[in-house]
Amino acid sequence: MDDYGKKISERMWNQPDKGELEAEREQTFIDDIVQKAYIERELLDSLDDIETAFDGGAGCGRFSILLAKQGIHVTHFDISESMIKKAKEIAKKEGVSDKITFVKGALEDLSAYADNSFDLVMSFDSPISYTYPNQEKVIGELVRIAKKKIMISVSSRLGALPYLANPIQKNQFILDKDSKDAWVQWCLSNREQMIEGFSFNKEKLLKAFDNGLLDDIEETKKAYDRGETPWCISYHFMPDELEGILKRNGVKNISLAGPGAYARTIPNELLVKIMNDPKQREEFLEFCHKFDSNPYVSGMGKDNLFAKGDL
Ligand SMILES: C[S@@+](CC[C@H](N)C(=O)[O-])C[C@H]1O[C@@H](n2cnc3c(N)ncnc32)[C@H](O)[C@@H]1O
């Protein structure tokens, strides 16, 4: 079995500062705010008859802790000790530690869980994509352990391809240019250099369009073997492909969405203005949810393709 995906993910996500860095994301970038708001809204609207949930690749608990605060028993499952440590710290602060079972494990092996174990199974912001080349089997396993509902977001192929012609796209979403955040400052100080070093590469785009992989995975594997910590291999799904996999596994009433599709059409100055006015911000996030839920734009979300369905 090719387990490079798992080994590379394990090394990358277990870096000691990973939990801290991920926990800060929503104060830093507007696309992350929009995507988180989308998923929160979806979750809070779907909790009738949900008593138990499994969060696969739950990170520092953005969604597991949200559900625990609603009284749901959540199994918080993740490959990274440092993410789990941060999640435990936040859960304690929020007073919901007794509602959450923390488990360190890889999505590639869910054999410890019986069929239909959890009312709701969820996995957000790409953990499934990081299990390449086992992503299809992993979705099948997540469906198997779900009893009533499944909700996931994975890396989006159509949503990610613009990166290859726009290496400065994260700049569009910087909320505060004076932020001390290292990534914000990196984006700002490297802007000119990124533009100068850029050239349009049709070959690379066509390859990624075809195979769903933005990086050269042989290079990633070699870097791993040299002892480096490359970004994990990420498989990017097409909307019809994701829908087909869910259908083949017996999921019904499937709907797809592209969180961030509307926000990505708006320039930074205007996004910042909207975000800094509480009323506009609330109304904007509400409208984003409506627009991004339209199946015609599902592929054009910012980074993620969202899917939900019933069992
Ligand atoms: C971008 S974070 C998302 C975290 C969380 N779902 C959220 O939306 O806040 C991706 C998470 O997936 C976890 N992960 C990556 N590969 C995994 C695997 N093979 N099995 C389980 N977790 C994995 C990482 O440790 C990390 O916490």
Image (cartoon, rainbow, N blue to C red):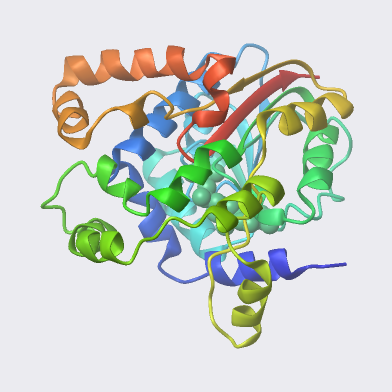
Position of residue 152 measured from the top left corner of the image (x, y, whole percent)? 64, 33
Position of residue 107 measured from the top left corner of the image (x, y, whole percent)? 73, 52
Which residue is found at the position 54% from the left and 53% from the top? 202
Position of residue 9 measured from the top left corner of the image (x, y, whole percent)? 62, 64
Which residue is found at the position 66% from the left and 51% from the top? 235
292 displayed left or right of 307: left
246 displayed left or right of 75: right
223 or 107: nearer the viewer: 223
Q: With respect to residue 266, does 25 lie above or below? A: below
185 or 115: nearer the viewer: 185
Is residue 117 among the parts visible in the rendering? no
Which residue is found at the position 49% from the left and 71% from the top? 15
Screen quadrant of the C terminus: top right
Image quarter of residue 30? top left
Which residue is found at the position 47% from the left and 20% from the top? 292
Position of residue 252 measured from the top left corner of the image (x, y, whole percent)? 80, 15
225 displayed left or right of 125: right
Q: With respect to residue 24, does 148 lie above or below? A: above
Screen quadrant of the N terminus: bottom right
Image quarter of residue 79? bottom right
24 displayed left or right of 217: left
Q: Residue furthest left?
A: 178
Is residue 205 among the parts visible in the rendering? yes
93 or 30: nearer the viewer: 30
Number of numbered markers: 0
233 or 168: nearer the viewer: 168
